[in-house]
Image (spheres, grey):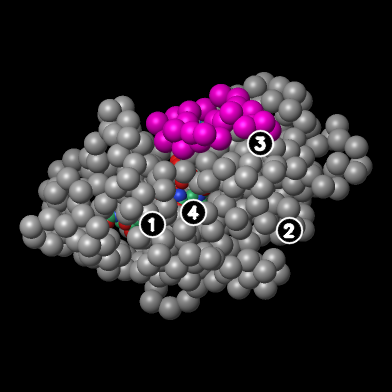
């Protein structure tokens, strides 16, 4: 299958590109190459036959229309987005542009292209809109996010993603564009930008710097190894019926503080220092509007598409810690471009030292 992937130089997009190429699909990677992109994520893959790259902004309607017309894809996997909650608090503009306007332009271009396809190709065409569990807001102690959970986004990021989900739904209902949507929990694994929790902890621990835990560390996330997500995304693209939505998650709920301690223990084992890495944990000012708990009910995708995560959180964390320790070249390059693990996402600078 010839798949147009947006955001294929990002964390999850590059995992999808690597897996799809490995399985024999063709890829057109459309990426603007923002700060979050890294073509090193595709080192060794871009020379493969069946891979094409187009540097383009998804908000640029003319560029996207040209890419559809020139490459004639069988399907779209739309992952390009501004993805970091803390950055959405500091500067929501790019989130509104890319996540809302960009998704609108992708849907419009896909619709124009879809109209040119033969009936057989129309039958097979899918626009897979990749979204997040954050659109559902925050859970209390009980319950899980299901596909029919009402939307209640709380951050500029999640609000922009929720809006993009509604656009995708509307293009499906109104224009019969064959859209499928998936909403996934927190991903982790190799090639994740060092702004996100897991690489923050590993790299701070490695440097012997304080490990910042927001608030009391009692917020809960549901962790999924990135390759398990990529596998689910390709399965949904190829087998889901037009109009369906699927929640994807690992049934791996952890309090942040427990996860951070687990990583510290792995670091003690793999990269010991004179005192335990846990001593570096520092409770810092909380994220404004911090969602308390996310947890996914993945029973629909398990039942209907026979998908299951293959990596336990213990195994995935061990592999991830080892990967960052073995691949300093990858994250040092990001450091040299100016990101050195500084605190992001405080609504006001005065909060920085509150703990
Ligand atoms: P990422 O930030 O690592 O990568 C995003 C990619 O999109 C980058 O390569 C960037 O250059 C590209 N991009 C951004 N703006 C663009 C634009 N205007 N035009 C073209 N390309 C642009 O993100 P990620 O963590 O890989 O997330 C990918 C998708 O999955 C996003 O839609 C995100 O909302 C969703 N998601 C992420 C997670 C997670 O835990 N990371 C979980 C659920 C859903
Ligand atoms: O749930 C899916 C979402 O997961 C995706 O849609 C987002 O794109 C992705 O970034 C992720 O969002 P989170 O905000 O949950 O991820 P992050 O890694 O930023 O934070 C995870 C938790 O850790 C969260 O409760 C905030 C906390 N945290 C984060 C950082 C960066 C800390 O305590 N310290 C930190 O330094």
Pointers 4 and 2 in contact (C-beta within 8 Å): no
Viewer-nearest of discs 3 and 1: 1
Q: Is residue 54 magenta?
A: yes
User: Which image quadrant for residue 61?
Assistant: top right
Extreme-bottom residue of the structure:
142
Between discs 1 and 2, the one toward the N terminus:
2
In the picture of the structure, the residue carrying the numbered disc 1 is: 319
Q: Secondary structure at mark 1?
A: helix
Dot 1 crowding, Cα within 10 Å, few <14, some 14–19, many 20+: some
Of the two numbered discs 1 and 4 on the same chain, state the one appearing first in sequence: 4
Q: Which residue is mark 2?
A: 240
Q: Is residue 330 left or right of residue 106?
A: left
Estimate the spatial distance between the alpha carbons at disc 2 and disc 3, rounded to whole Å: 20 Å
- Say which residue label 3 marks: 27
Q: Which residue is mark 4?
A: 226
Q: With 140 as the anchor, is 150 left or right in this view?
A: right
Question: Which residue is found at the position 48% from the left and 64% from the top?
Answer: 311
Range shown magenta: 31-55
How far apart marks 3 and 1 lie (CA) works out to 27 Å
Location of the N terminus (image quadrant): top right
Image quadrant where residue 57 sits: top right
229 or 41, which lies in front?
41
Q: How would you rate the neighbour count of disc 4 (Cα within 10 Å): few for under 14, some for 14-19, many for 20 or more?
A: many
Q: CA distance from mark 4 to mark 2?
A: 20 Å
Q: Is the C-beta separation of discs 1 and 2 under 8 Å?
A: no
């Amino acid at each position: 299958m010839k798949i147009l992937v947006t955001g294929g130089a990002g964390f999850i997009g590059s995992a999808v590109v690597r897996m799809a190429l490995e399985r024999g699909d063709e890829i057109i990677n459309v990426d603007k190459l923002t700060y979050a992109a890294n073509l090193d994520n595709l080192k060794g893959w871009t020379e493969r036959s069946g891979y094409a790259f187009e540097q383009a902004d998804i908000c640029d309607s003319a560029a996207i229309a040209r890419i559809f017309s020139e490459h004639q894809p069988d399907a779209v996997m739309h992952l390009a987005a501004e993805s970091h909650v803390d950055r959405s608090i500091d500067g929501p503009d790019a989130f509104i542009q890319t996540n809302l306007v960009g998704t609108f332009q992708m849907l419009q271009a896909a619709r124009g292209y879809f109209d040119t396809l033969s009936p057989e190709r129309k039958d097979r065409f899918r626009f897979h809109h990749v979204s997040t569990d954050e659109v559902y807001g925050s859970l209390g102690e009980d319950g899980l996010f299901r596909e029919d959970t009402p939307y209640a986004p709380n951050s500029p990021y999640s609000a922009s993603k929720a809006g993009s989900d509604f656009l995708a739904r509307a293009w499906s209902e109104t224009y019969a564009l064959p859209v499928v949507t998936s909403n996934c929990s927190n991903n982790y694994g190799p090639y994740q930008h060092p702004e996100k929790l897991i690489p923050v902890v590993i790299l701070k621990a490695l440097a012997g710097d304080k490990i910042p835990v927001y608030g009391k560390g009692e917020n809960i996330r549901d962790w999924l190894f990135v390759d398990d997500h990529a596998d689910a995304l390709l399965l949904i693209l190829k087998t889901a019926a037009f109009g369906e939505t699927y929640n994807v998650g690992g049934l791996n709920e952890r309090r942040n503080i427990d996860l951070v301690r687990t990583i510290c223990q792995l670091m003690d084992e793999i990269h010991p220092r004179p005192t335990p890495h846990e001593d570096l944990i520092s409770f810092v000012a909380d994220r404004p509007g911090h969602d308390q708990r996310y947890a996914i009910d993945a029973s629909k995708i398990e039942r209907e598409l026979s998908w299951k995560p293959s990596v336990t959180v213990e195994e995935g964390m061990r592999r991830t810690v080892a990967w960052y320790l073995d691949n300093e070249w990858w994250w040092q390059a990001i450091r040299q471009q100016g990101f050195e693990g500084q605190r992001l996402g405080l609504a006001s600078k005065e909060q920085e030292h509150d703990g």
